[in-house]
Amino acid sequence: MAPHESASLAEPEYEDAEFRPWGVVLRPPRLLLTLLGDYWWQRTESLPSAALVALLAEFGVSDSAARAALSRLTRNNLLVTGKVGRRTFVRLSDRAASILDEGASHIFSFGLHTQPWDGMWSIVAFSIPEHNRAARDALRKELRWLGFAPLYDGLWVSPRDHADEVVGQLAELGITTATAFRAAAVPGTGPDGVPQRAWDLDDLQERYGTFVEYAERLRERALAGRISPVEALVERTRVMDEWRTFPGLDPDLPGELLPETWPRAAARDLFISAYDLLGPVAVHRVRQIIARYSRDLAAQAAYHGSGLAASAS
């Protein structure tokens, strides 16, 4: 049911009487950046601020909250604002465009390839006194960023070779009561002592299962052409938002350490399929909204698929 370029920009009716937009899960500033990244990707033209307020209204964001989001993003140098007469126009800053490009690459590549594993673990053991809590908290934050998790309170592990990065972080933080090394688990270690126990894989598997059920239903409805432009915009943003939590939750453990039926690959396939199928329908709704303020700019709105290739269809 993808609309053609010549399709009318008249306001649509809800095609599904049971459809109600999901509640705002994303904060308005992050939601707005997500929408600009999805439908105004790599464009330098400025959009009327009123159009962005109306776009956020599709997700239940009030006018005041939307304008507060615009102000906050401008203060943080993520948006650039200007005036044309009495109208305010907004565009992404170069910094924001770079952040969106990097984020999109990470989101769409996650789960695509599994790195081979040499059977070795990176291990960090540390004992940092209470009076140096700031350094301890900073170290833990950096370790999580590198993919480590605590096996025990002062013993963190990762199946990837990040020992050199950890040594650099220890030096930068001035921490001397810590050791980083590489080691292999001894065969015969009981299930309560294996390093992968540092991650709650049961909970993560359940989260993947819930996502698979949702994305599968969404894909089926999209394939059947049973999603209106209004719903497509909301659901495409939702499936993106829910999928992009997984890179932060999933340590991307080697296959040897995972259950045989690990659902990451199935979840990724469903996300990619649903996201790509909804693109042509969702961008139609975006154009309808922008056209209230500028038909010329509305025609410039486009969507990109999971391969990050922009399309105006």
Image: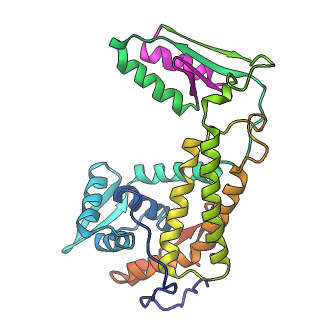
Q: Quadrant of the C terminus?
A: bottom right
Is residue 271 positioned above or below 263 on the image? below
Give the quarter of the image for residue 131. Answer: top left
Is residue 37 positioned above or below 183 on the image? below
Residue 177 at x, y = what percent? 48, 7
Q: Is residue 18 magenta?
A: no
Residue 135 at x, y = what percent? 39, 19
Residue 222 at x, y = what percent? 63, 76
Q: Give the residue at x 52% y 84%.
A: 16
Query: Which one is nearer the viewer's eye here, 130 or 310?
Result: 130
**Is 46 on the left-hand or right-hand side of 218?**
left
**Is 199 on the left-hand or right-hand side of 128?**
right
Give the quarter of the image for residue 137. Answer: top left
| Residue 160 visible in the snapshot | no
Q: Quadrant of the N terminus?
A: bottom right
Which residues make up the magenta segment? Answer: 148-176
Q: Is residue 161 magenta?
A: yes
Query: Which one is nearer the viewer's eye here, 228 or 291?
Result: 228
Is residue 78 positioned above or below 221 on the image? above
**Is 312 on the left-hand or right-hand side of 74?**
right
Residue farthest along the left direction in this orientation:
86
**Is 244 on the left-hand or right-hand side of 216?**
left
